[in-house]
Image (cartoon, rainbow, N blue to C red):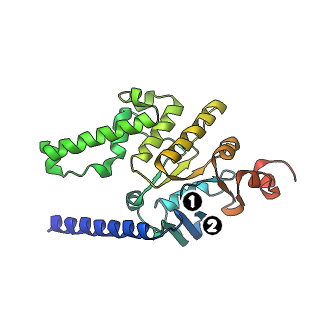
Amino acid sequence: MEDLEKRVAELEDRVTMLGYRISVMENRDPVLEMQNVEKHFGGVHAIDNFSVKIEQGQIHGLIGPNGAGKTTIFNNITGIYAPDAGKILFRGYDITGSSPHRVAQLGIGRTFQNIRLFSNLSVMDNVIIASGMDATYNLAEAIFHNKNYRRREQHLQDKAMHLLEIVGLQDKANERASALPYGHQRKLEIARAMALEPKLLLLDEPAAGMNADESMELVDFVQEIRSRFKITILMIEHHMDVVSNLCDYCTVLNFGKTLAVGTPAEVKSNPEVIRAYLGGTE
């Protein structure tokens, strides 16, 4: 009985996904739209009436001081938190309060401010594990290593190597993830996020801990990812040189509220932004 219920649930998931894909083909909604989203922790308004609209192919930056609510926005999008109010739409599909698994299935990948790798596993295995939704074999096939299992495992290895080639880590495939330099670990984390084949990629401070040369290399790398995969990117970043060279538009946050929206040049010259974030006077 449990097996039957499981199969029914899987079929319902597939029907939902099929309906989602059809709806995507039929409309041209923004890739991401957040409408009046709020998130409270006790008496603290971590996100206060936040709205944003991100079109296909854009790189949109979230900037602001520590504690402004940037990572909380990511956590609401990816289902780690459920908003207390408002709505989140992904390509026209309402994902408000959806589980992290469902959000990943629909096509949203993310990295984290603090790198989250399986440090004792190889670089290759880190990417293979991230491709778990492609492992479409059952327990019996995995135990007996039948033809379907072997075919899918080869597919996962080929896909992982392809992603490592894109991020320039193919020659590090068999090294332990913990042995990689910091900048390479950042690239590996992005490769893991790309293993989900996302349409929207959330990057949480990708240039954190990098020097000026590494930051500019990251700019070229992210631009290449956007161009190659036709992907939309929402990123949190404190390095204004990275933001200026990479983002099409920015939203500046302060205490959970939107302070300014515009191009990097526009927000950098905004007196309110200068006072609250960039430093200096009008």
Amino acid type, residue under disc 1 in the picture: Ile
Name the secondary structure under disc 2: strand
Give residue 23's position: percent from left, percent from top: 41, 70
Q: Can the viewer see residue 242?
A: yes
Query: Considering depth in this image, is 36 or 31 the residue closer to the camera?
Result: 31
The percent coordinates of residue 199 (x first, y second) are 46, 55
Against 176, residue 111 (above or below) is: below
Q: Which residue is mark 2?
A: 50
Which is nearer the eye, 130 or 255?
130
Q: Nearer the viewer, residue 266 or 188?
A: 266
Q: Does residue 272 appear left or right of residue 229 in this picture?
A: right
Q: Which mark is residue 143?
A: none
State left or right for residue 164 relative to residue 59: left
Kindly check if marks 1 and 2 are in contact, taking CB atoms under 8 A apart as contact.
yes
Q: Position of residue 211 (x, y in %)?
A: 64, 32
Q: Which residue is mark 1?
A: 73
Q: Quadrant of residue 127?
A: top left
Nearest to N terminus: mark 1 or mark 2: 2
The residue under the point 46% across, 61% down is 79
- Which amino acid is tagged 2? Phe
Quarter placement of the N terminus? bottom left
Q: Position of residue 147 (x, y in %)?
A: 14, 44
